[in-house]
Amino acid sequence: MNKKGLFISFEGGEACGKSTQIKLLKEYVSTLKNKEDFVFVREPGGTPLTEEIRRLLLNYEIDKPLPMTELLLFCAARVEDVEKIIKPALEKGKIVIADRFYDSTIAYQGMARNIMNVEQILKLTKTIIGDIKPDLTFYLKLSPEEAFKRKSKINEGLDRIEKEGLLFHKQVEKGYDYISNLEKERFVIIDANKTPDEISNEIIKKLNNKINNM
Ligand SMILES: Nc1ncnc2c1ncn2[C@@H]1O[C@H](COP(=O)(O)OP(=O)(O)O)[C@@H](O)[C@H]1O
Ligand SMILES: [Mg+2]
């Protein structure tokens, strides 16, 4: 692939503040002259089909998928998002900002559900989407205990995976720690206990640094 753009992902366990930060980043981008250069995508989602897969994965009450089915549905949606949104945007030189990418599969389906080990997930990922990987990944690190406190304030509207217990989310954190250590060069680890504005400033600074070095 003749890649010219920049691919940024946001990762971290539930309630670490990904959506909050992406919203703040969108506000910042909306003030820029080149705002058209930015493309935001949530994973899975963003196309009619992947929004439907997202609904099946997160909010489908009728039947619970087997762990392997869950893994493959996330992967199926990723293929769609990569081929239909992410690659075309990068080929046009855009800056793509994704709410989650394959590190989530490593943490959730790999480490927490233990469906495949990390090496197998990386191999599967490479098989289905090729060499594409984020140039920069913001990992918002928040202890599962702190995340649970935040979630207890929200209470309503938690999806199927958010409703998993503390042990599950501790494994998710282990997964993120593992992959962020394995692919250090692209990871920026952020203390998600700071205020949203502090975190946002840190992210914008790091992002601008990366853009200036493109
Ligand atoms: N830095 C922060 N400090 C305290 N609370 C936060 C912070 N960032 C987000 N929150 C709150 O935590 C909850 C989850 O945030 P959200 O951005 O939806 O997380 P995610 O998308 O990672 O699940 C929301 O109620 C949000 O207002
Ligand atoms: Mg979110």
Image (cartoon, grey):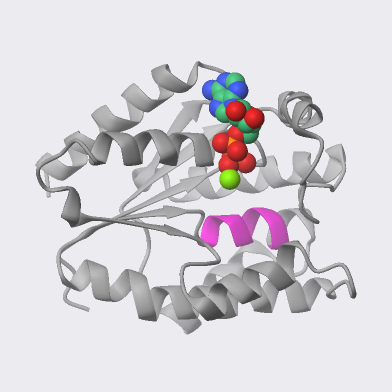
The percent position of residue 61, horizontal first and vertical second, equals 87, 67
Q: Nearer the viewer, residue 206 or 41?
A: 41
The percent position of residue 101, horizontal first and vertical second, equals 50, 59
Q: Nearer the viewer, residue 149 or 184?
A: 149
Q: Taking 71 as reference, is 103 above or below it?
A: above
Query: Image quarter for residue 104?
Result: bottom right
Q: Quadrant of ligand 1?
A: top right
* Number of numbered discs overlaid on the protein picture: 0
Asked if one can make out residue 153 in the rendered structure from this viewpoint, the answer is: yes
* Residue at position x 83%, y 47% in the image: 163
Report the magenta stretch's main SS: helix
**Left or right: 214, with 153 as reference point:** left
Is residue 65 inside the magenta stretch?
A: no
**Left or right: 41, with 140 as reference point:** left
The percent position of residue 149, horizontal first and vertical second, equals 77, 24
The magenta region covers 102-109
Asked if one can make out residue 120 in the rendered structure from this viewpoint, the answer is: no
* Residue at position x 42%, y 41% in the image: 22
Is residue 106 inside the magenta stretch?
A: yes
* Residue at position x 65%, y 36% in the image: 15
The percent position of residue 89, horizontal first and vertical second, equals 25, 69
Q: Taking 157 as reference, is 86 above or below it?
A: below
* Residue at position x 72%, y 23% in the image: 146
Which quarter of the image is occupied by the N terminus?
bottom left
